[in-house]
Each structure stands twice: as structure tokens, then as C-alpha cells.
Amino acid sequence: MNNLLQNKILAALPRTNAWLESIEDNIPLYMSADIRDAGFKIASIDANLYPAGFNNLDASFHELAASGLKAALARYGVTTGKLLIVSEEHTRNLFYLENVYALCSILRRAGFQTEITTQFALEGENYQDGRLSLTTAKGSTLEILDPGSIGNRVGEFAAVVLNHDSSAGTADWLKGAGIPVLPAWQAGWHTRSKARHFAHYRELMQDFSQIVGVDPWFFGALDAHITDTDINADAARAAIAGKAEILLKEIQAKYDEYQIPEKPFIFLKSDHGTYGMAMLSFDNAAEILDINRKEKNKLFKGKSSVVVKDYLLQEGVPTVLQLPAAAGGVPHFAESVMMLANNRFIGKFGRVNEQKGARSSLNSTGMYFKPLSLAECENPETQVATIITRIAGVALQREIGELVKPGTAQPSLQH
């Protein structure tokens, strides 16, 4: 990030912290955000309410993460007892299982007992005595409870810690759990909208930019929303291309205003998706008209094979962050993944891609994660990224507030 922008943000930290504390209410238990630093701007380009990355945190962060999660649970009146972690069903991903194992370990460090289940029963698996034993990427063992038996046992737990994004919907037993479900199950990807999230994010950035004294564009990505469409239809792609052309002109106008010698680009992504699925990038609108069958198929279905009908066109934010490669190799482009609990910093790691450039999605083939020590993150860059992520956390808070219906809300905060 350029020094002028960074210094402006750091100089405004006391006012920014006071502002954030004044608007933090039912903040999410935890979250993560992908932060892109283009040098001339820094922005959150995606926010995850059910983060899968605890295994990527360096061990030096574990105590901080445990303290943050303990404080986050206490906000919702959960100070002792046993927690039920609800994981995703894609248990063939051994690195995801490593994430669940790391989350369990951190919560145990915070003083809680933990058990693990999934929302839905795992197909093709035989539960022995109501349990299933799975092995993580590093050879650790996870005992998974049969979700079919949880309804009779849910009273044993103080709260559910949800690590499942509900892309394909929510299990009935979880809806009727009768104990705190954190974060709220109502805000899974079956209802969340990236367009809604970034609308809240932009509104918050208006206030933040007044505190810092710069254009809010330096902290966000311009976007456009497309709803109820079929990417396979020529007319639908033509309509998307029309919106893309307008968006590219808006980005170019900002580049011209601030004399930025870059070429605009955009991402077309599922409005309800995650894991980098159902997403493509384009340098010009005409490319959208000419996407091939493979690209259409990629955009047509997201996680859990859910058909995509709603999309977000989002300004591409290039990255200047690079990590050194092996001797004789070229550096790999990277972006920061920031993790919060209680809307406070608990860790950071790098998403790196050995096959992609500065203008690409790094959440794709060639991706790997780079753990960073706590000492490596004690710098102005992390301070700035933390502020941006906390603002994204408040945007998530406001999303949850819109999605949780009266009578199904999370428990009141403990003051």
C-alpha cells in the first residue's frame, strides 16, 4: 500500500476504533475476509461467516485465537460447558478436517469441551455406536457424531459453533436446536447475498472515509447485481455484458481521476457462493458474450451443485503482495486472509498461487496457504487490514440482522 494512504489510515486509528466500538452490536462469533492490496487501494473482496482456515494459523496465534473466541462466546452468554461444532459434509477434503481439528483444539484451549457433528448424515458411511472416526491431513483423528441422534442430545451442549455455510439449506434439527447457534444459521449461503453484504460494506465505508479523509473507493470494489438469470441463455449474457460495460467505464473513470495506469477488469461471481466456485474474470464486456461451454458450466453451478441464478459483477482489485519462491523461481502473488473473533484480530495467513497473476482470483488451481507468525504480523499493513476486516465484520452483523426473523434471533448480548 502506498505510504500516503497507509499513514492517513493509521493517523485516524483512535477515531476509527471509537467509531467501530460504537456500532458493534450482535457481531458474528467469528469471520474471515480476503483482503486485496493493490498499492493504490485496499479492499475486502469477500467475507466468510463460517471460516475454514484455522489450520492455516501459525501456532503463535493459538492463544490469541482462544482468547478471542472465549470473549466472543461470552458476548452471547456462553462462558462454560460443552460446545457442538457443526462441520461441513465434504469430509474427503482432509485439509478441511484439519481446520475442524484446529478449531476444536483452540476452543479447548479456551476452556470448552467440544464434540463434532455435521448437519446431514454422511452418505456411504457407517456410524458405529452413533459415531464415525475420520482422519485429518496430518493424521489426527476426529470423532463425528451421527446427526440423526443429535436432536435427542442437543440439551447437553451450551451452544452450537457453526462451521457449515448451509449452501444447500439447513437441517431441521439445527433450526430447532433451542440453544445458541453461532453464527446464526439463518445467514448461510442459502440466504446470504454478496450484493447485500457489499451494500452494507459501502455504506460503512462512507463513514470510514470521512474519518480518514479520502474517497471511499480506495477501500472497496465497485459492483453490479444481476438476479434471476440463466447464464446459458444468450439474452441473459447480453444483459450481463451490458452491465459489465457500464461497470468497466465507472472503474476507468476512477483510474483516470487518480491517474492510475492500470487496465480495469471485473469478476463475475455467484451472489451466494464461496470456495472460489462459479467465478470468472473479464477484461472487457464482450468476453462475457463469448464464454465457452466449460465456462458456462462453471458459472451455472456453485457449491453443493446448487444452480446459480444470481450474480455479482465486481471490480477486480489487483494485488501487489508477492511471496518469494524457491531459489531460481519467480515470486508468487498472494493476498491476505484475515481472521476475527469478537470482531477482533485473531490471525492472518497468506493465500498464495503459483500459477496466477496479480489480476487473477488466487482461490483456484495452484493455490496454497502460507502461515505467518504473530511476530511477522506486528506491522502497519496488518493494522490497516484489521480495520478493513472489522468494518466487513460489522457489514456481516447488519446482514444477520436482516436475515434473522423475530423470535429466532440469537440470544441477547451480556453486558
Image: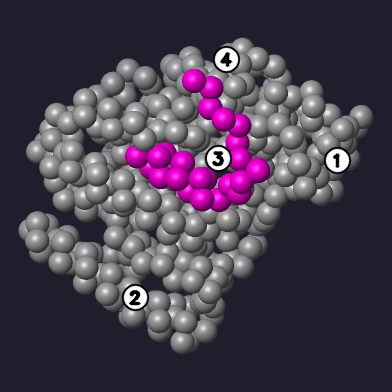
Q: Which element carries disc 3, helix, strand or loop?
A: loop
Give the Cα distance between marks 3 and 1. Answer: 22 Å
The type of residue carrying mark 4 is Ala
Mark 4 packing: few (<14 Cα in 10 Å), some, or many (20+)? Answer: many
Which numbered disc covers residue 243?
2
Residue 164 screen position, x and y as percent = 63, 42
Is residue 280 placed above or below 373 in the rendered structure?
below
Residue drawn 52% across and 42% down?
Answer: 49
Q: Earlier in the sequence, mark 1 or mark 4?
A: 4
Residue 152 screen position, x and y as percent = 87, 33
Give the Cα distance between marks 3 and 2. Answer: 31 Å
Q: Residue furthest right?
A: 129
Circle 1 residue: 148
All told, the count of numbered labels is 4
Circle 3 residue: 50
Q: Between residue 231 and residue 174, name the one nearer to us.
A: 174
| Tag 3 near tag 4, CB within 8 Å | no
Give the Cα distance between marks 2 and 4. Answer: 48 Å
Give the Cα distance between marks 3 and 4. Answer: 19 Å
Q: Earlier in the sequence, mark 2 or mark 4?
A: 4
The region drawn magenta spans 390-415
Mark 3 packing: few (<14 Cα in 10 Å), some, or many (20+)? Answer: many
The type of residue carrying mark 1 is Gly
Give the Cα distance between marks 1 and 4. Answer: 28 Å
Circle 4 residue: 110
The type of residue carrying mark 2 is Lys
